[in-house]
């Protein structure tokens, strides 16, 4: 018997930072995916990434199924999501595994329950929720649901550099640096909420760009100011980043000539890095 689960990637976050002395983020999903397939075997076959194996065990524990019964489940992951770039590759693998496991045992959990389960394995992104939200990546809880966005594209700038989220979080000054940005991040979340509610990409872009610049005191993105300048000159709406990763996104609507923007990026010095 086989079962399947699927989960999208993100291009970093719209906004990430401190609200009410807790860390929150708002990720957005893109059309890149992790697809997990599970199959029951006759022999013990404990294969696959540790985090995804742990996701299977979490589901079994939730429904009081003996963990021994998970040992003979084969796990295969097919993903086109770059690893170590801040595109939620781990969250997508874990989320898709949870969904595949639920299908295998014929059980259901809602999006919030899946997010809570994933956050017990590692800090997670809000992409496991169908709606945009202000989301705590450490405990998997939703502070507030936001409106959806369905009329946007993103140009993703991906460097060779790889950065593990855990490395960022282990910095002893991580939380203090986040606190320095608190006032700006509050404004960013307000702009984002209003922009999503009004389907206003300009406001969303402002929120993203401000959050990107604020995060420079935590992890600098090479050529960020040049990318923002090109975004502005080309009529795009703003620039977002992976706050604990390395990718950068330029937000556009469905009608914009993205090839024209890409040509401009390729002609600039930053193309040597991204």
Image (tube, rainbow, N blue to C red):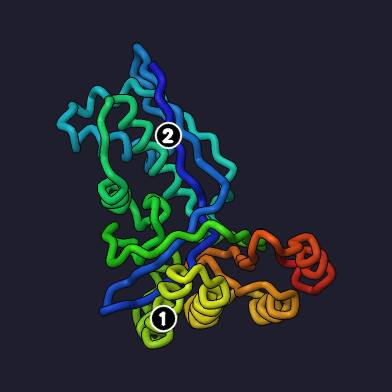
Question: Mark 1 — residue?
Answer: 185
Q: Position of residue 257 (x, y in %)?
A: 76, 63
In this view, the residue farthest toward the top is 42
Toward the viewer: 23 or 134? 134
SS label for mark 2: strand
Residue 91, relative to residue 170: is it above or below?
above
Residue 152 located left or right of residue 45: right
**Residue at 52% across / 77% down in the picture?**
203
Mark 2 surroundings: few (<14), some (14-19) or many (≥20) residues within 10 A: many
Toward the viewer: 188 or 70? 188
Mark 1 surroundings: few (<14), some (14-19) or many (≥20) residues within 10 A: many
**Residue at 35% across / 23% down in the picture?**
73
The quadrant in which the N terminus is found is: top left
Residue 208, relative to residue 12: is it above or below?
below
SS label for mark 1: helix
Q: Position of residue 166 (x, y in %)?
A: 41, 61
Residue 266 located left or right of residue 54: right
The quadrant in which the C terminus is found is: bottom right
Going from N to C along the chain, the mark reached first, 1 or 2, is 2
Q: Position of residue 267 (x, y in %)?
A: 84, 69
In this view, the residue farthest toward the right is 267
In this view, the residue farthest toward the left is 64
Residue 22, relative to residue 124: is it above or below?
below
Q: Position of residue 18 (x, y in %)?
A: 34, 77
Q: Can you tell which quarter of the image residue 246 is in?
A: bottom right
Q: Is residue 158 visible?
A: no
Numbered circle sitting on residue 5: 2
């Amino acid at each position: 018997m086989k079962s399947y689960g699927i989960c999208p990637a993100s291009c970093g976050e719209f906004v990430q930072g401190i609200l009410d002395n807790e860390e929150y983020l708002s990720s957005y999903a893109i059309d890149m995916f992790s697809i997990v397939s599970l199959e029951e075997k006759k022999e013990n076959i404990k294969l696959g990434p540790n985090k995804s194996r742990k996701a299977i065990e979490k589901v079994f524990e939730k429904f009081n199924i003996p963990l021994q019964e998970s040992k003979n489940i084969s796990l295969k992951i097919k993903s086109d999501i770059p690893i170590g770039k801040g595109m939620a590759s781990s969250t997508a693998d874990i989320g898709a595994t949870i969904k595949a496991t639920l299908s295998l045992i014929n059980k259901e959990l809602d999006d919030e329950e899946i997010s809570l389960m994933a956050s017990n394995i590692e800090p997670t992104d809000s992409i496991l929720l169908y709606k945009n939200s202000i989301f705590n990546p450490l405990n998997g809880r939703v502070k507030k649901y936001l409106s959806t966005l369905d009329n946007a594209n993103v140009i993703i700038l991906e460097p060779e550099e790889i950065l593990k989220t855990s490395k960022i979080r282990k910095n002893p000054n991580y939380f203090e640096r986040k606190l320095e940005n608190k006032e700006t991040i509050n404004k960013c979340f307000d702009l984002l909420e209003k922009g999503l509610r009004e389907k206003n990409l300009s406001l969303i872009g402002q929120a993203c760009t401000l959050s990107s610049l604020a995060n420079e005191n935590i992890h600098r993105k090479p050529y960020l100011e040049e990318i923002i300048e090109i975004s502005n000159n080309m009529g795009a709406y703003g620039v977002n980043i992976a706050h604990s990763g390395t990718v950068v996104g330029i937000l556009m609507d469905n009608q914009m000539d993205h090839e024209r923007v890409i040509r401009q990026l390729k002609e600039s010095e930053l193309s040597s890095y991204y």
